[in-house]
Each structure stands twice: as structure tokens, then as C-alpha cells.
Amino acid sequence: MPPFRHFAVMVWRVLRRALSRVVPVAVGVVVIVFFLLRLVPGDPARAVLGDTATQESVDALRAQLGLDLPLWKQFVDFVLQLVTRFDTGDSLVYHESTRVLIAERAPLSLGIVAIAVIVTLLVAIPLAVIAASHKDGPLDHLIRVVPTVGLGMPTFWIGLLLIIVFAVTLKWFPVGGVGTGALEPWRSFVLPAIAVSFAAVPPLVRSLRAQLLDVMDADFVTTLRAAHIPERRIQFRHILRNAAVPSLNLFGVNVAYLIGGTLVVEKVFAINGVGMLLFNSISSRDFPVVQGVALYCAIFVVVITLAVDAISAVIDPRLRAAPSHLVTA
Amino acid sequence: MMAARSATRGSAATAEDVDVPRAGYVPFWRRALGSRSFVAGATLFGALLVVALLAPVLAPHDPSTQNLTGGLQTSSADHLLGTDQLGRDILSRLLFAARTDLRIAVTAAAFPFVFGVAVGIIAGFVGGWVDAVVSRVIDTVIAFPFYVIVIALVFAVGVGEPGIYAAFALVGWVGYARVMRASARTLRSAGWVAAARGGGLSTPRVLVRHVLPNVLPQAVVLLMTEILLIMVAVVTLGYLGLGVQPPTPDWGTMIADGQNFITTKWWLSAVPGLAIVYTGISLSLFADGLGDAWRVA
Amino acid sequence: MQSPLIPLRRRALKIGVAVIAAALVLTGCATDASTSSSAESPQAGGTITIGRTASVTSFDVNKEITANNAFAIDKVFESLVSFDSDGKIIPWLASDYTVSDDGLTYVFTLRDGVKFSDGTALTAKDVVFSLERHLKLGADAPLPLDAPITSITAGSDDTSVTILLKSAYTPLLAELASFSNGIYPADFGGKSEEAFFKSPVATGPFVVSEWDTNGDLTFVKNTNYWQPGKPYIDKLVYKLVADDTQLLQQVQAGQLDAIDEVPYSNVTELQNNASTTVVTNKSWEIEQVFFNTKNKYFSDEHVRRAIAQAIDRAGLTQAVTFGTGTVANSLIPPTISYSATDQGYALDYDVTAAKAELAQSAYPDGFAVSLAIKAGNSAVAQEAQIVQEALKQIDITVTIDSLEVATFQEQVYGNLDYDFMINSGQSDYPDPDELVSFQADPEGWSQSYWTSYTNPEVTTLIQQGRVTASGDERQSIYFDIQKILASEVPYIPLYFTSTIKASTSKVHDLTLLPNGSIRFQDAWIEQ
């Protein structure tokens, strides 16, 4: 087979698998987001207009939002809006497209997620390597047990502690908000990102350690050892790379967790990102925005999972033909 | 939540261990007591349960009795952990909060456990279009970051306990369903299951009599982790003002109430936080130990 | 302490007259008074960045009422008259005004040399245009011009404005002092209404420079401002920090120059900190317990009186406000004229008397009710818990019903579906008519603050108060109203709140107004 055909076939396979899973999930996401807020008790129109509203203006808003239409018609309109405008309507408070509102704030949230990803990897990989290379030793036990403490620590509480220690007392980082300037925003993201990473590290350490142990026992490692390749080089060049693929998948799923944590921690650090938008919209019952945030977060997670899937397929040829094990284990 | 679900991903693949029933049988308790995690976890968690159940006996004061002129006291013989803004005894509130949060977490974990296990083994065992549909639904729910969907649901259903139960009922089952589905699928092709089916046993009977007992330990281990995660989420919702409402003591609202005083009276927020950390450690160890004992994790 | 929710200020129905003898007593809390004073001479230039928990969403001066918008609008738009930090009515865009003896004709003389920020001069036509638009908005104006106005006309030389009334209306000046009667150029200076309010031009000390409706707002100084040399600062930034603990920590760390909200609990901490300054002023806001008088239990006056005597208002005020609030013994706060807080009308805390009072009611053995509060406000949550515990003493079992703001509005304001609630009443200008009309007029838009409280005698007194000229006669009318309210207890005023702001010690001369706004004309910052 010529190299190009080979590549094209591979791309096609990855793409087909992706589409066969993405399409139903996308449909599911849209349906959930639509019904999510039809559960709201009370009249959203009155909720938005507040206590000074007359019945006429409430009725007018109901009509404007299409709340007076039959449910199926509302759903059709919702989908059409999604397809034509890529959003869930205009914010009832800001009178702006939810897509624009979210896009404006997304960089802040994504900045935190990005740093959280880096922090998580920087902590998890060395720990996993150390644990695996000291299998069943005291160090291994320590590394398996201690980080699980992070699972039981609420992100917001870690955030509070970090503020007190590293911002108020040591003044290494801003207490909150986002500074202006070239590097200042990144400095503002560090503490929130660390807070978010706490719970993401333990599962990654566990999985990576298990994968490393599997690979260490693999035949090719034995061969390499027999060939007197330095142990350090075996560990980093060969074992880690081979263990990376399954952990990459796990990490893809973890991004969803990091996003959720980021939205919560934004409140603690008063960072005006997507999370803050979500909480404000909940206070003001701005339901198109709540829907938009849920929708865009889900889409982002799906895209990340897909990307991880594709990257794994590229790294590890064995996966190209195999049935996907990505989203569903 | 996602993190913990994914933690069990690896273990899902090892579910094959389970289909070798009773080989080299060692009693559960023997293995359990041999696991340091189990002993430590069970002791710590047991202590927490006792404290929660006996809170009315153990608490030195009524958690809601106020002393408007005795607010924000520091530690004393009468109030070991001091008093809060309304002059209530913090230690007593801490103990009663254990009761509240544990009760809510366990209650909220119950339905997703039953439903998730049922859906998971049915989908995995029956396969075909049932499995396809269930898998797509799981994928869809998982696509939403946990806190985003829980907060949106609590918002939709209403703050407080009913909102919490509804939210977890709608999203919590997915973790079990995924893992159970994978395990049941593996079992389907196992020889002895095929034999049972060939022997004329109906699918429901095989599921309940043979598949369920084999996958249940794994689900119970997962349940411990889920209770912890729900607890952390309940506390987080309490902190955000979307969870347990005053005057019911709850660690999350205690942290939130103490937040204004964090630079001057740090213990108001730190102590309830440490209580959650304690719970986390005990449940993690307990889950780990159960896994060791059942050899599922 | 306040949630990041947009604080809803109450809609005002009626208006009030002025002439306030506001003898402001700055008590107890040993703070820095209503102006962060300094002996040094002001430095010009620099930027003051103030953190606020809600963003500015609209500049339509006639259509907004919530604090997040109102206190941005009043930096850009100014009214004919205004009020000072004591709540006293003072001339503003009008340098002088006269009222005819029959109270039907008001003539305002415009101040010389007032220009809009684009350099054009303020004329009487602009005033007529602005006030007439406000009148025409009708129900769309939440703080309307309710005076019985016959006409608003510009004087022949375009420097005076005459307002004619159908009948005497004492609250008119106070009503005109509201930010909602701000003046802008006739015909919006040739722009469309929408375009104008996106980039408004008016006479205020600041001009909108950059504005994100869900984020920060930057004002620059109006170089054409009529007060010579002012404002001192070049820029004023409203930074959105949607969490009051963060506000606190950021001002302590010097990330913010000033903050718009200070949790009661942290006032002392900021005062003791050498790098921060606290500014407080008495406000026009009253924290209260409101009864639904249509409720089975609360329709019984004895029940309401019993509850009033079961709550330790002094203890509550101390525990919740840390001494920043003042125990309320009347509906009208001392910052507004004719407050009866020192007249001894209110029922005192006395559990024995409360039990005796309840014994006279139809429910001597107590009952169970639910107390509605808005979710997310920790001060109110603390108050609710205090009330709950207090009523336990007289065998009334209280469930706290913490409602999302929207649900609260629908259930309480919309359907009157509640037992009793904690909420705050607020005046928007310094005349007692606004508060009593809003809280005791069953025919009014709020149905006696959603309590359905009806007393024809009070209604008559309210009418009289509007048309009676300021003086002893008017005072006795409002004293009578407050006496009846204290005895029949449709609501229990708990405490008068203080407006509290804080800044770093580099910021000087912030002027706090009793409506909760800050005047920045005189403010300056050390460079």
C-alpha cells in the first residue's frame, strides 16, 4: 500500500469512529441542555423582569422567548438557533449572544485549565514513575495513599487555604482577580490551577503507575535490559512513552473534571470567567446563559476526547483498527 | 467525580479476575483484616459513623442554641472549638454537620447505585441495541463536567436537599453503569455463564443469580468513592449557597460563614474543612481496603 | 456578606419634600465619618479603581433602579437638585429655586456655565426634554415623577424652568433630587435613544470611556465639569469582583484602591489595618421582618405584637452588624425627617410580655410557620436563624425558607404566598413619604410592602403628609403613622443599616451618600 493511501485509510478510520460516536452524543447533549431548564420552577419571564414588572411586560417577554409556544416548537427553534447562530439565544440580562458572552470569558477559564493540566502532569508523572520503580516499597505506598487525600478536599476549600498562605501571608501571588500586563494573568491563574489539580492528580498517578508496571513487565523491556541500555533511558524513552497512551485517554476524561473544578474555583478567586458567568446567571435566572455554559462545556469536553482519541491513534498504531475504547470504557 | 470514575477505568479492564469464582478461596474477612487500608479505613470511617449517629449524645451543646453577645469566642473549656457568629458552639455544630452531610451523601448515593448497577449489567449482558443506547446516554452525561451539570440541575430543581437528590439521581448512576457494563460484558463470554444459559436459565435469572454477585463487589468499592465525591459536592453546594440551608449545620455553610473571618479567625473555615479531609481519607482507605479484600481494585 | 446578586432596590412610588434637618449622629462604631477626611491638600491626577460585586448593565437614567446601575448613572447624569451626605437637599444644576406659597409653582434657575461633557451648554430645553421623557415613560420608569405635574416649561431666556402642579405636593424637591431625574441634552443631542445611552453625554463629573456590560467600566474625568478643578482624578474604574471576601482581600493587598461593599464582620479588621481606611455613613435602609397580614396566624395583631417582643433587636443588631447598624425603633430612619425612633413607640424586648401577648391571641399554644428569605445573603441568613431561635421561646416553630431571588420575587411579591419574611426597605430620596407610601398604602403598587396591611386612618394620614408643608404639622402626621405602625406591627424594623465602604489609605475624601452611592468629585489619590 502506498504511504499516502495508508495514511488516508488511517485518517478515515479515526474520523468514522469519531463521527459515529460524536453525532449521538451531540444530539444527546442538545436534548439535555434543552430540557435542563424547562424544569425551572416559576416563570422565567417574571423571574427576569423582577418585581416591578407588569403582567403585560411579562407576557411580552414570554412571547419574545417563545415560552408560549408548544414544547416541540420550542425545541425546533432551539435547534435552529443552535445551527444557525451557534448559541442558545441572547442573554436576558446582558442582551448579548450567549456565544459572545462565553467566548469573551473563555480565555480566563481556559487559562486556568491549561495551567492545571501542566501542574497535574508535572506532579503526576514523576510520582507515578517513582511509585512504579519502587513497587510495593514504602515510597510506593506513600505515593498511592497521600495524594488520595486530595480527592476528599473540596476545591474551593483548597483555594481558600492557598489564598491565605500564598497570597495574603507570603504575597507570592495575587489574592484574586486577574491582573493586567504580559505575564500577570498567568500569575493570577497559578493558585486557582493548583487548587483544581489537587483532585485530578491521584487517579492519574494510579493509572499511570499501573500502566508503567504493565509495560515494565513487557517483553521488549526485558530485551532492552538484556541489551544493557541504561535503566534511566529505558524508563524515560521507552516505558513512559508506552504507558502514555492509556493515561492520555484517562487524562482526556480528566479535562472534564478540571473544567468543572475551574468553574467553581473562579468564584473563590473572583476570576470573571465562564464559572462566574454561570453563577451570576443562576442568580439572575438568565437561563439561556446557563444553557449556553452547559452546552459549550460539553462540546469542549467532546472535542478534547476526540482529539485525545486521534492523538492516541497516531502514537499507537495498534489502536487504529481496534474498536474504540475511548469515551466508553 | 470524573476523576474517580476514571480511576476505576483501569480496574474495569481487570474485571476478568472476577469470573474465576472461588478459586483458592480465602474468606473475605481474612483478606480484609490482612489489608492495612481496610483496617485503617474501616476504623476511621467507623469512628465517623459513630460520631454522626451519636452526635446528640456527644455534642456538649445544642448546635442551634445561640448566645448573641457571645459570638466568635476562641477556644475555652466550655466551647472547645469556640463559638460562631451567633454564639453557637462550633464543636457541636461540627458533630451535627457530620450527621447531616453523611446522611445526605449516603441517601443521594443510594438511587444512582441501584439504578446504575442495574442499567450497567443489563446493557453489558444483553448487548445489542440496548447496549448501544445506554452507551450513548452514558457518553452524553459524561460529556458534561460534573459540577456544571449538578449546579445547573440544582438550579433547575431548587436549592436544598430535594435539588441535591434530584441532581445526583440524574447524573450519579453513570459511573456505576460504565463499570458494570464493562464487567458484565466480560462475563457474558465466560464459559460458566454460557453454560448457565445453555442450561435453560432465563436471562433475568442469570443476571441476578450469577452476574450480579460477581460484579457487585466492584460496585460497592465504587460506591464508597462515590459517597465521598457526593459529600464533597454537597459541601461545595453548601458553600455556594445552593445546598443545605441554615440553620441545619453543614460543613460547607460553616466554611462559607467563616470565610469573612479567615484572616483573623482562620479556624472557623479550617476546622470544617479538615473534617471533610478526614472523611475523604477514611472513605478512600476503606474503598481501597474493600478492593483488596474482594480483589477487585 | 452580601451575595453577588444584584441588589434590588425598592421601587419608589411617591415622592417627598425636602428640607431635612438631618442631625446625623455618627455613633458607636468609631469609624471615619461619611467622608474619608484628610488635612492634606488634594493631588490631581491618577486612577481610582473600586471593586464592586455587580457590573453596570445600563445607563438609561430613567429606567434603572438597581444599585449596580444607579451608582454609575449618577456619575454621568446630574439632577436639578441633589442631597448631601446628611440627606439634606442642596441646589445642584439649579443654583436656586423658589416655591410659591400655595405650593403649586416651582421655578428653578439654572446654574451659570454648566456644560455637557461634549462642551455644549446646558439649557432649560434640555431640562424640559429630560423630565418630560421621564414622565412619558409611565410604568417603564421604576422611580417615576409621581407629582401631579401640569406642565414643565422653559423660561424665555432659556435659563429657568417652571414646574406647575395640579395640587400641592411636598415631596417634589426630594423626588427631583433622585438620580432618575438626571438631565441630558434635548433630543439626545441628535443621537438615537439607544446610541445615546450606550455612550451618554451629560453634565456629571465623569464620562464613560470603556464599558463591558458584564465586566469592568472605565470612566474618564469630564474636562468640562462645572465644579472648577474637579474631579481631581483622571480615571475612575469600576472593577467587577463578584465576591465580597475577595473585595476585602484585594483592598488589603492593594490590588484595589477602594471597595463598594464591606461585610459587617470585617469593618473592625479594616479599621485596625494601617493600610486601609473605612468610610461609613448612615443610610436610608431599614432591615425588617414583614408579616403577611392575610396569613391565618399573622392576621392576629396579638401574634405580631408577641413576636415583636420576643426578638432581641439589640442583640441581633450587634451580632449581625457588629455594631455598624443602629437598633430601629421606628420605620423612618433618623436620616430622614420625622423619624420617631426616639419617641419610644416600639415594643421592647420582653419574653414574658411576649408570652402574655400570645396568650391573648387565638393561638396561645403556638404554631408552625415558615420564614421566607432570599438565598445567598449571609447577613439575612444569620438574622433568620436568630428570629427562628427567638420564636422557639414562645412556642412558634419557624422553618427558614431560603428562596432563589427569582422564586422569592414570584412567591412573595407576585403571589403573596408567604407567612413572614426578612427583607429591607429603602428610601431613594430624603422624604418620609416614599417609605410610608411604599410600606403602608394598601392601594399602592406594593400593597403595603406585600403585607396587605390596611388601616384607613394610616392611608388618610399618608395623603395628608403629601400635601402638608414641612413643619410641625407634617411632623405630627408622620409621628402618628409611625406610632400606629409600631403598635399594630405589620412589620418589625430591626435595624438601620450603615453604608460602609473602604479604601486603601492612599485614597482621600470619598463622600458617602445615604442612598449608598459615593461622590467622587472631591476624591483624590496619593501618587
Image (cartoon, rainbow, N blue to C red):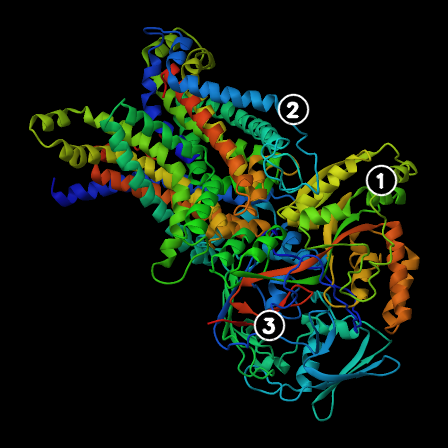
Is there CB contact under 8 Å for labels 2 and 1? Answer: no
For mark 1, does the 10 Å Cα neighbourhood hold few (<14), some (14 to 19), or many (20 or more) residues? many
Total tally of numbered discs in the picture? 3
Q: Could you tell me which quadrant the C terminus of chain B lies in? A: top left
Q: Amino acid at mark 1?
A: Tyr
Residue behind mark 3: C75
Closest to the observer: C335 or B187? C335
Residue B72 locus on image (x, y percent) = 62, 42
Chain letter for mark 2 = B
Closest to the observer: C267 or C228? C267
Q: Please, is residue C207 above or below residue A72 in the view?
A: below
In 3D space, how far apart are the residues under numbered discs 2 and 1 (Cα atoms)?
A: 32 Å
Chain letter for mark 3 = C
Q: Could you tell me which quadrant the N terminus of chain B lies in? A: top left
As drawn, the residue found furthest toward the bottom would be C157
In 3D space, how far apart are the residues under numbered discs 1 and 3 (Cα atoms)?
A: 47 Å
Closest to the observer: C31 or B24? C31
Mark 3 lies on a secondary structure that is helix
Label for residue B56?
A: 2
* Residue B252 seen in render: yes
Q: Please, is residue B190 above or below residue C95 in the view?
A: above
For mark 3, does the 10 Å Cα neighbourhood hold few (<14), some (14 to 19), or many (20 or more) residues? many
Same-chain status of marks 1 and 3: yes
Chain letter for mark 1 = C
Mark 1 or 3: the one toward you:
3
Mark 2 lies on a secondary structure that is helix
Closest to the observer: B226 or C378? C378
Mark 1 lies on a secondary structure that is loop
Same-chain status of marks 2 and 3: no
Is there CB contact under 8 Å for labels 1 and 3? Answer: no
Q: Please, is residue C233 above or below residue B68 in the view?
A: below
